[in-house]
C-alpha cells in the first residue's frame, strides 16, 4: 500500500522527468522529416501528414475497434507468458538439474523464428485470436523464463542465512529478501517481453487474422497507403510507450529503490 | 586585470549567506575608487535600465513615425541588433565581469579607469547607434566591436587558464557573439552576401545558448545560497547533461534555421528544443523540500519556461503554414527571457555585491509579473490581430516599467559604497 502511495506521490515529478525522452523523440521525428524531404511522400510520408492521417483515422474509421482487439491479444499473450515464464523460471532456478535441463529447450524456443510459429499456429488453431495469442506466448515466454531463472539462481545465500538467523517470518523473507532480488531480474524481462508481444501481435495479425492493427496494416499495404501504415505503427508505438513509461517504469523505480 | 591586492580581507565579519560572493576581496585592488567605479556592474546597471526606458520611448516615436531615423532603410534589423548587442550586451558584461572574479581564485576585479573606459565605450556605442545614418556604419562598427572584444580579452585569461576548463564554453560563446557582431556589420556594409536578418537569428540562438550556460551557474550558486539561508538541508544541482541536451537542440535549431529557413524540420526541432529546455526544470524539484515558489527560484524557472515556450511556439508556427506569428513568438526569447534574466541578474548582483542580504519584496514580484504580462501580450499579437497596435504599445510600456522601478530603487545602492564596509 505504501509502495502504491509512493508511486502516486512521485508520479507528477516522474512524468515531468519525461521531457528529456520527449526531446529525443522529437529529434527522431526531425530525422524522419529529413528522410521524407529526401525520398518523398510515397517512400516515407512526412510526420505531419502521418499524424494528420492518424488523427483522421481515430475520428472517422473503426480503427479504435482494431486497436482494442490488438491490445487485448497482446495483453493476453503477455500476461500468459509473464505468468507462466515467471513461475516456471523461478521454479527451475531453485533446482540445478532443472536449470541445466531447461537450457537447451529455451535455446530451441528462442532460436525458432516467430514467423514459423505463426505458420504452425495457423495450422493448429486456424485464423483467429488463438493463433495470435499462442504466437505471442511462445515468443515471449523464453525471455521471461530466462529472467526468472537467473533471478532465483542468483539469490544470495548470505542474506537467506541472515534472515534465518533472525528468524524472520516467511512473508517478510519473501517481501524483503527474495522478492526485491528476483524482481530486479524479472521486471526487465517483462518489459522486454512486452515489447516482443507488441511486435509479434502485429505480425501474427497481418498474416492470420481479418481484424486488428496487423490486418489494417495489410489493407494499407495493398492500397500503397504509406501514411496509413505509418499512422498504425505510430498507434502501436504510442501504446507501447504509454504502457512501458506510464505504468511499468514507476513500479520499477519504486520496487528497485533498494539498489540506491 | 590589476595585480595589486588588498591584504587581510575581512570575510569573517560578513553574514554567512553572502560569503560565497566575497571571494574576490582577497584580490581587490588597492586605492579609493568612487563607488560608481568600484565594480563594472555599478555604472552599467544604472545606465542599462535608464537606456531601456529611453530607447523604448524612442522606438515608440520611430514606429509611430514621429521620429524619422531611416537606419540605412532597415529599421527592423537595427532595432533587433540594438536590443541584442546594445541592451543585452550591457547586462552580460555587467554579469560576467562580476562573476569571473567569483569563479576563479586570484582574479582581480575590474575597477576604476577600466570600468570608466568600458562604460564610456558602451555609452558612446549607444549614441553612435542612433546616429548611424550620420556617422556611417564603419564608425559605428569601430565603436561597437571593441567593447565585447575588450571584455572577452579581460575574461579570457582566467577562464582559459583554468586547468579544469570549467567555463571554456562561456568564453567560446562570448567569442562567437563577437564574431556574429562583426558578421552583421559586414553584411550591412555589403562586404558579405549573407542575409543580415539570418545573422541576427543566429545571434539570438547564440545568446540563448549563453543564457543557458549562465543560468546553470547562477541557479546553482543562488539557489544553494538561499537554501542555506533558509536552513533547508537539501542541495540544488543544475545537472550538466540536461543543459547540454538543451544547448544541443537550440544550436541545431539555430543552424538549420540559418541554412534551411522555412524548412519543416524546424517545427520538430523547435518542439525538441522546448522539451529539452523543460527537462532542465527537473533540477528544481528537490527530494525533500518544495522550493518552486520561493522568491528568486520561480523567476529563474520562468526564464526557462519562456525559452521553452519560444522554441515550442516557433515550432508550432513552422508546422502550420497559415499561422504567421514566428517573429512574435520569438519575443518569448527577447521580451521574456532577456527581460527576466536582465532584471534578475541586476537585482541579485545589485543586492549581494553591494553588501546586502538577498531578499524579495513586493516591488520585485511586481516587476516580474509586469515582464510576464508584457511578454504574454507581445506574443499573443498573432491571435488578436485587430488589437495589434494597442498590444505593441502596451507590451513595450509594461516591459519598461520594471526597469524604471529598478533604477529608482537600486540607484542609491549602486551609487554608494557597500553596506558592509568592504571595498567594491
Image (cartoon, grey):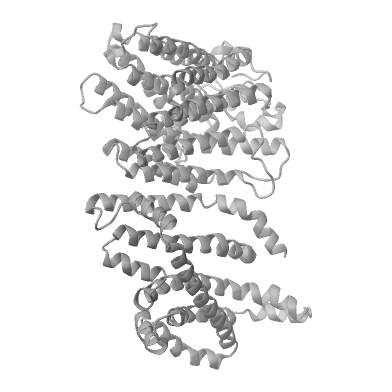
Which part of the image, by quadrant, shows the C terminus of chain B?
A: top right
Is A236 situated left or right of B31 in this image? left
- Residue B346 visible, this angle: yes
- Residue B32 visible, this angle: no
Quarter of the view holding residue A84: bottom right
Residue B421 to residue B175: above or below: above
Is B198 situated left or right of B389 in this image? left
Residue B349 to residue A214: above or below: above
Residue A146 to residue B59: above or below: below
Which of B241 and B159 lies nearest the eye of the viewer? B241
Q: Where is residue B229 in the image (x, y as percent from the top left)?
A: 71, 35
Q: Residue visible at 58% across and 90% down?
A: A95
Residue B238 to residue B114: above or below: below
Q: Position of residue B116 (x, y in %)?
A: 47, 12
Is B265 situated left or right of B105 in this image? left
Q: Where is residue A159 in the image (x, y as percent from the top left)?
A: 68, 77
Which of A1 and A107 lies nearest the eye of the viewer? A1
Is A111 situated left or right of B296 in this image? left
Which of B153 and B411 lies nearest the eye of the viewer? B411
Q: Position of residue B120 (x, y in %)?
A: 44, 11
Q: Residue visible at 39% across and 40% down?
A: B315
Amino acid at each position: 500500500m505504501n509502495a502504491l502511495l509512493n508511486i502516486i506521490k512521485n508520479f507528477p515529478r516522474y512524468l515531468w522527468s519525461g521531457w528529456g525522452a520527449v526531446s529525443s523523440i522529437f529529434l527522431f521525428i526531425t530525422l524522419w522529416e529529413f528522410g521524407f524531404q529526401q525520398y518523398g511522400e510515397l517512400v516515407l510520408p512526412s510526420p505531419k501528414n502521418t499524424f494528420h492521417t492518424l488523427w483522421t483515422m481515430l475520428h472517422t474509421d473503426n480503427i479504435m475497434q482494431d486497436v482494442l482487439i490488438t491490445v487485448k491479444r497482446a495483453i493476453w499473450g503477455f500476461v500468459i507468458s509473464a505468468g507462466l515464464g515467471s513461475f516456471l523460471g523461478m521454479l527451475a532456478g531453485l533446482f540445478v538439474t532443472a536449470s541445466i535441463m531447461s537450457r537447451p529447450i529455451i535455446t530451441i524456443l528462442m532460436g525458432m523464428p516467430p514467423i514459423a510459429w505463426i505458420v504452425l499456429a495457423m495450422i493448429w488453431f486456424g485464423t483467429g485470436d488463438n493463433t495470435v495469442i499462442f504466437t505471442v506466448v511462445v515468443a515471449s515466454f523464453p525471455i521471461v523464463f530466462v529472467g526468472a531463472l537467473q533471478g532465483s539462481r542468483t539469490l544470495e545465500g548470505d542474506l537467506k542465512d541472515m534472515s534465518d538467523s533472525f528468524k524472520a517470518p516467511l512473508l517478510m523473507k519473501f517481501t524483503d529478501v527474495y522478492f526485491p532480488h528476483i524482481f530486479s531480474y524479472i521486471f526487465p524481462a517483462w518489459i522486454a517481453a512486452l515489447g516482443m508481444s507488441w511486435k509479434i501481435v502485429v505480425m501474427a495479425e497481418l498474416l492470420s487474422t481479418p481484424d486488428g492493427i496487423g490486418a489494417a496494416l495489410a489493407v494499407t499495404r495493398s492500397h500503397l497507403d504509406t501514411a496509413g501504415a505509418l499512422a498504425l505503427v505510430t498507434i502501436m508505438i504510442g501504446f507501447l510507450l504509454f504502457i512501458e513509461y506510464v505504468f511499468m517504469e514507476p513500479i520499477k523505480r519504486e520496487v528497485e529503490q533498494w539498489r540506491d | 586585470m590589476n595585480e595589486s591586492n588588498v591584504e587581510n580581507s575581512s570575510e569573517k565579519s560578513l553574514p554567512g549567506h553572502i560569503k560565497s560572493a566575497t571571494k574576490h576581496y582577497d584580490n581587490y585592488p588597492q586605492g579609493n575608487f568612487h563607488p560608481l567605479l568600484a565594480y563594472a556592474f555599478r555604472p552599467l546597471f544604472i545606465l542599462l535600465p535608464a537606456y531601456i526606458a529611453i530607447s523604448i520611448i524612442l522606438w515608440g516615436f520611430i514606429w509611430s513615425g514621429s521620429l524619422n531615423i531611416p537606419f540605412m532603410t532597415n529599421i527592423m534589423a537595427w532595432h533587433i541588433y540594438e536590443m541584442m548587442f546594445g541592451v543585452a550586451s550591457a547586462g552580460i558584461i555587467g554579469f560576467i565581469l562580476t562573476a569571473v572574479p567569483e569563479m576563479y581564485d586570484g582574479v582581480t576585479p575590474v575597477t576604476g579607469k577600466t570600468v570608466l573606459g568600458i562604460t564610456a565605450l558602451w555609452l558612446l556605442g549607444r549614441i553612435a547607434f542612433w546616429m548611424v545614418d550620420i556617422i556611417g556604419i564603419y564608425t559605428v562598427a569601430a565603436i561597437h566591436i571593441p567593447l565585447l572584444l575588450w571584455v572577452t580579452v579581460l575574461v579570457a585569461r582566467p577562464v582559459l587558464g583554468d586547468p579544469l576548463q570549467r567555463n571554456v564554453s562561456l568564453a567560446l560563446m562570448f567569442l562567437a557573439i563577437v564574431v556574429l557582431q562583426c558578421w552583421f556589420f559586414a553584411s550591412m556594409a555589403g562586404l558579405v552576401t549573407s542575409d543580415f536578418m539570418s545573422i541576427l537569428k543566429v545571434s539570438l540562438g547564440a545568446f540563448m545558448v549563453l543564457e543557458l550556460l549562465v543560468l546553470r551557474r547562477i541557479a546553482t550558486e543562488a539557489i544553494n545560497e538561499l537554501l542555506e539561508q533558509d536552513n533547508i538541508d537539501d542541495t540544488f544541482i543544475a545537472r550538466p547533461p540536461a543543459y547540454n541536451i538543451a544547448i544541443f537542440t537550440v544550436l541545431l535549431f539555430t543552424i538549420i534555421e540559418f541554412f534551411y529557413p522555412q524548412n519543416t524540420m524546424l517545427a520538430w526541432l523547435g518542439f525538441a528544443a522546448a522539451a529539452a529546455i523543460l527537462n532542465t526544470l527537473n533540477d528544481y524539484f528537490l527530494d525533500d523540500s518544495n522550493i518552486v515558489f520561493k522568491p528568486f527560484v520561480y523567476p529563474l524557472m520562468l526564464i526557462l519556461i519562456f525559452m521553452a515556450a519560444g522554441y515550442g511556439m516557433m515550432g508550432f508556427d513552422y508546422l502550420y503554414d497559415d499561422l504567421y506569428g514566428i517573429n512574435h513568438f520569438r519575443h518569448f526569447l527577447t521580451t521574456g527571457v532577456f527581460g527576466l534574466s536582465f532584471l534578475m541578474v541586476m537585482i541579485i548582483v545589485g543586492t549581494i555585491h553591494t553588501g546586502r542580504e538577498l531578499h524579495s519584496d513586493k516591488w520585485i514580484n511586481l516587476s516580474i509579473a509586469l515582464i510576464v504580462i508584457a511578454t504574454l501580450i507581445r506574443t499573443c499579437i498573432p491571435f488578436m490581430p485587430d488589437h495589434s497596435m494597442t498590444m505593441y504599445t502596451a507590451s513595450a510600456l509594461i516591459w519598461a516599467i520594471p526597469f524604471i522601478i529598478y533604477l529608482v530603487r537600486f540607484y542609491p545602492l549602486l551609487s554608494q559604497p557597500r553596506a558592509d564596509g568592504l571595498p567594491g
